[in-house]
Image (tube, rainbow, N blue to C red):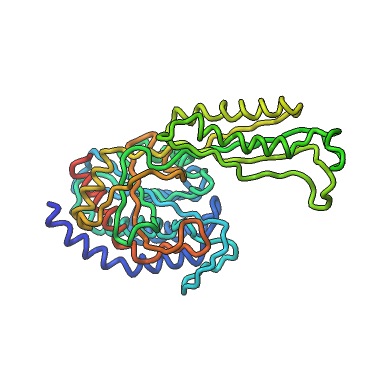
Amino acid sequence: MTTIDFLPRLRAAVADVLPEIIALRRDLHQHPELSGSEERTAGIVSEMLMRNGIAHETRVGDTWGVVGVIESGQGRGDKTFALRGDMDALPINEERETAYKSQIPGVMHACGHDGHTANLMGAALVLNRLKDDLPPGRIKLVFQPAEETVRGADVLVAAGVVDDVDAILMLHGWPRLAPGVVGVRDGAVMASSDQFLLTINGKGGHGAYPHDTIDPIAVGAQIVSNLQSIVSREISPTTPAVVSVTQFFAGTPAATNVIPGTAKLGATVRALSPALRDELPERIERIIAGICAAHRATYEFSYSYGTPVTVNDTSVMNLVREVGRDVLGAENIVELPEPTMGAEDFAYYAQKIPGGMFRLGTGCEHLLHTPKYDYGDAPLESGILMFAESARRFLEKGV
């Protein structure tokens, strides 16, 4: 079936399932679950897949992950395309007043994963309904837990979820774009996300006699200040990186006249270049070691690698561009001018197979990870159309 023949049928199917998908998103928004605790969400996903006759596995990788499979067309094709949606929420208390406001104190879908899950389910329902009209092949539906804690994608990859997949696609709601607008970009699109923890061991004493101490607060302050020189003086301005000290603990609230014996710092480290990412730990520790030595302090330094750089495959993104122009109109497909220094564990899939992530406009006036963010209902139709037609077109001609 040609694209011209298929698209009207796709639009009709999307219109038919949209009320159910809106209800699903609102229900998920009211009942958010933190990373690793997505039991209710996974149960709803499984029940909907089962009710619609879509084969699937639950508790994938001993997580709350759910992975469905749609066998399309007449006969078995040789291509497999995956669609991914994350399910977890954030430990933020919702402040936005809506009919579907979170009912769980201190937990909300501040990153829009309610919408991501709903978009993927909508695509699953319409693709399953139209599967006999699709080219032969397989479509995997990856409902992923624990994106926010970076303990989801790598576990599913290790469990073999994408071993038989040729390419994978995800969307992410983006408040800086209007509903129905898709943002695309090739190459590095989101940064790696690593962290370090530092303990500075000094010598405590009375605040009136600092000369008898080795003040870890003074040492830590110099470390925080000098770490900024890595980005400003050691890295090209055209190569983005971030070294942000976000934690500094020292002293006791009960006394202002005591110089503590230790101070603890924590930081997030971001890069868009895998090569630079590998160099940053040594550069950071060099500064720490030098300052501690100058002040006769010792230190304990722990560096942890987290999410890799998310790199969009050009061929997959060209597929998204083509589908977007046909489905939403060329005026609604925009090139993103720059990557972001946020992180996304979709990077683990994209390291293994060609992957692509596009931004889907939500038009929300509030930013991600804030108490008033809401994915909303407006992006759902566009997201389902993009997911479903991208899967069909990949099975038809690959990338």
Query: Which one is nearer the viewer's eye here, 365 or 20?
Result: 365
Indicate whether 157 appears above or below 13: above
Query: Which one is nearer the viewer's eye here, 21 or 318?
Result: 318
Q: Residue 20 occupies which quadrant of the picture? A: bottom left
Indicate whether 314 appears above or below 86: above
Count of labels in the image? 0
| Side (left or right) of 112 relative to 358 | right
- Whether residue 52 is visible: yes
Indicate whether 149 appears above or below 361: above
Q: Position of residue 100 (x, y in %)?
A: 47, 71
* Quadrant into which the C terminus falls: top left
- Whether residue 308 is visible: no
The residue shown at (84%, 33%) is 211
Query: Which one is nearer the viewer's eye here, 146 or 228?
Result: 228
| Side (left or right) of 74 relative to 128 | left
The residue shown at (25%, 53%) is 333
Q: Position of residue 200 (x, y in %)?
A: 72, 34
| Side (left or right) of 255 relative to 282 | right
Q: Position of residue 139 (x, y in %)?
A: 30, 47
Give the residue furthest to the bottom.
Answer: 99
Q: Position of residue 18 (x, y in %)?
A: 31, 66
Q: Residue 312 occupies which quadrant of the picture? A: top left
The residue shown at (42%, 49%) is 57
